């Protein structure tokens, strides 16, 4: 049975294809449209996942009207259970507590086999997502899009305003509650005048430097978010009588909170790569599969589910008259590793692009993490983003413990780059945040063989099995999907080399 899942009208629209219970293709519409967080009907994404064939069933997350339903049956599923299902049915074990933390919902489910049971929910405006969005907007960023910037800013601050913020959110062993006097969920700003009187005037534009007052607010909000999340996680585990925890929702990507849960709670953690509302398309497809077959789908253990452009790359290079060298894989990997060791910045485009917001070695910008100045080079000359934001490293899994504190129970969050951990060495300053942490991707050989061999080559010449790995995009743009997008970004920036499949492009 072939089931196409879709969601739109929420922060990120997307589509997936489930075939005999296994995810075959998945993509956000933004990768094709070039519009970051594109919420429109996922026409291009659906065309891609269907692959020219008519699915047996369409599964839609949400209540939006579906156009083109004449091609097959349509099933609709509410957004909340779709988000929960996306992570739970992707999880390789059959029993878990499920915690959804998003803007519209906070909820706990109990998952067992092919069943999901709602335990408790907190609806908007009493959600942790609203608390995080209000803080994000107070600091001048766009809610949803700017949450990860607040996490980066928090590393520069001290949590000296926790007591003040506790007036806005009450946390207990049974959950939390927002004090609505401090929020304005229906207004232009999500925070009220009372919130401003508590913390002072908000930033009237996105924070571009680590201003101490704003950094302290970010750090204080992070402390309270972690406290609330751990309380909810304990409740989810208890409800499921399990040490397995599955997270979903946009706030599931708070890497510092995820590390703290693993360090303090003795659990196994799983978060599917597209954890936010964009992943609801996957959850809807899973729910339809279970409804049709009464069987549990196959787990999702690889994020490389997007479109591959290997055939198009040659035509693109030829039709645009681009000077490029075609190489055998061994030579290409050696040349790229040599360039990285010499301080060059490399755009890396190989294979199917990633499902979700993390660059995991298919669409990445790579650099040498040993060079302290490389953080500024990539931030200012290539990514053109706020200088306080950290970069993530990728490390060979078999050597990860040498460089990072790798907690037990976090195998998949570490492979999907969803956790912030302490750094154990001073050898990789460009990939180490100001607070001594990093958000590593732990890379086994079979996860992404070509990327793994690139790191192997880099380690052979430098002794360091780590590369700085950031997403292949410019500020305000989605991660590139096609060779056209990659080459355009390469030309707009001060990247030195571009790897397009087995072609090498150099500037000059």
Image: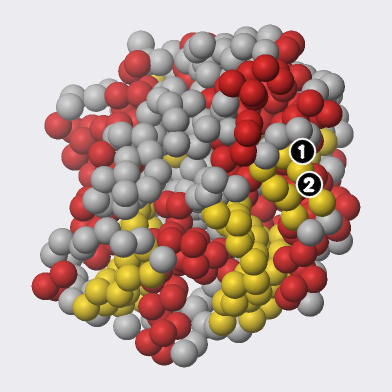
Q: Earlier in the sequence, mark 2 or mark 1?
A: 2
Q: SS class of the residue under badge 2?
A: strand
Of the pair 274 and 74, the residue shown nearer to us? 74
At horizontal 79% and vertical 54% (from top left) the residue drawn is: 231
At horizontal 46% and vertical 65% (from top left) the residue drawn is: 82
Residue bearing mark 2: 171
- Answer left or right for 494 relative to 407: left
What percent of the width, then of the height, locates residue 423?
82, 33
At horizontal 45% and vertical 36% (from top left) the residue drawn is: 186
**Quarter-of-image position of residue 222:** top right
Of the pair 79 and 472, the residue shown nearer to us? 79
Please determine whether, in this image, residue 324 is positioned above or below residue 65: above
- CB under 8 Å between callouts 2 and 1? yes
**Quarter-of-image position of residue 425:** top right
- Answer left or right for 297 relative to 161: left
Residue 224 marker? 1
Q: How is the image coloured?
A: secondary structure
Q: Is residue 251 visible?
A: no
Quadrant into which the N terminus falls: bottom left
What percent of the width, then of the height, locates residue 184?
52, 32
At horizontal 59% and vertical 77% (from top left) the residue drawn is: 117
């Amino acid at each position: 049975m072939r089931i196409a899942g879709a969601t739109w009208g929420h922060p990120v629209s997307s589509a997936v294809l489930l075939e005999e219970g296994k995810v075959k293709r998945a993509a956000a519409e933004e990768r094709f449209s070039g519009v970051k967080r594109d919420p429109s009907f996922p026409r291009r994404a659906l065309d891609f996942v269907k692959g020219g064939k008519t699915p047996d069933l369409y599964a839609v997350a949400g209540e939006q009207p579906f156009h083109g339903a004449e091609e097959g049956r349509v099933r609709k599923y509410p957004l909340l259970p779709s988000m929960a299902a996306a992570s739970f049915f992707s999880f390789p074990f059959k029993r878990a507590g499920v915690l959804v933390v998003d803007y519209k919902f906070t909820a706990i489910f109990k998952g067992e086999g092919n069943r999901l049971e709602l335990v408790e929910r907190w609806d908007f405006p009493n959600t942790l997502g609203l608390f995080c969005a209000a803080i994000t907007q107070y600091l001048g960023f766009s809610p949803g899009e700017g949450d990860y910037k607040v996490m980066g800013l928090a590393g520069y601050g001290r949590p000296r305003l926790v007591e003040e913020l506790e007036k806005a959110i009450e946390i207990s062993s049974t959950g939390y509650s927002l004090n609505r006097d401090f929020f304005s969920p229906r207004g232009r700003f999500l925070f009220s005048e009372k919130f401003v009187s508590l913390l002072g005037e908000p930033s009237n534009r996105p924070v571009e430097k680590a201003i101490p007052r704003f950094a302290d607010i970010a750090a204080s909000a992070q402390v309270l978010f972690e406290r609330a999340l751990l309380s909810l996680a304990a409740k989810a585990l208890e409800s499921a009588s399990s040490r397995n925890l599955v997270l979903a929702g946009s706030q599931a990507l708070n890497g510092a909170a995820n590390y703290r849960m693993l360090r303090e709670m003795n659990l196994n953690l799983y978060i599917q790569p597209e954890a936010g509302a964009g992943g609801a398309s996957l959850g809807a497809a899973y729910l339809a599969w279970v409804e049709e077959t009464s069987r549990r789908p196959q787990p999702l253990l690889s994020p490389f589910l997007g479109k591959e452009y290997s055939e198009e790359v040659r035509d693109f290079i030829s039709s645009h008259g681009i000077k490029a060298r075609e190489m055998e894989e061994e030579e290409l990997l050696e040349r790229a590793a040599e360039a990285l060791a010499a301080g060059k910045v490399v755009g890396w485009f190989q294979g199917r692009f990633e499902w979700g917001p993390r660059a995991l070695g298919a669409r990445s910008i790579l650099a040498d993490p040993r060079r302290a100045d490389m953080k500024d080079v990539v931030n200012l000359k290539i990514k053109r983003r706020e200088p306080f934001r950290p970069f993530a490293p990728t490390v060979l899994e078999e050597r990860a413990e040498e460089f990072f504190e790798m907690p037990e129970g976090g195998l998949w969050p570490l492979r999907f780059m969803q956790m912030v951990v302490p750094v154990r060495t001073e050898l990789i300053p460009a990939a180490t945040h100001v607070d001594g942490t990093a958000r590593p991707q732990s890379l086994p050989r079979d996860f992404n063989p070509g990327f793994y061999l690139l790191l192997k080559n880099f380690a052979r010449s430098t002794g360091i099995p780590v590369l700085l790995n950031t997403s292949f995009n410019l500020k305000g743009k989605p991660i590139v999907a096609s060779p056209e997008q990659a080459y355009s970004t390469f030309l707009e920036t001060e990247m030195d080399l571009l790897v397009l499949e087995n072609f090498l492009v150099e500037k000059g």
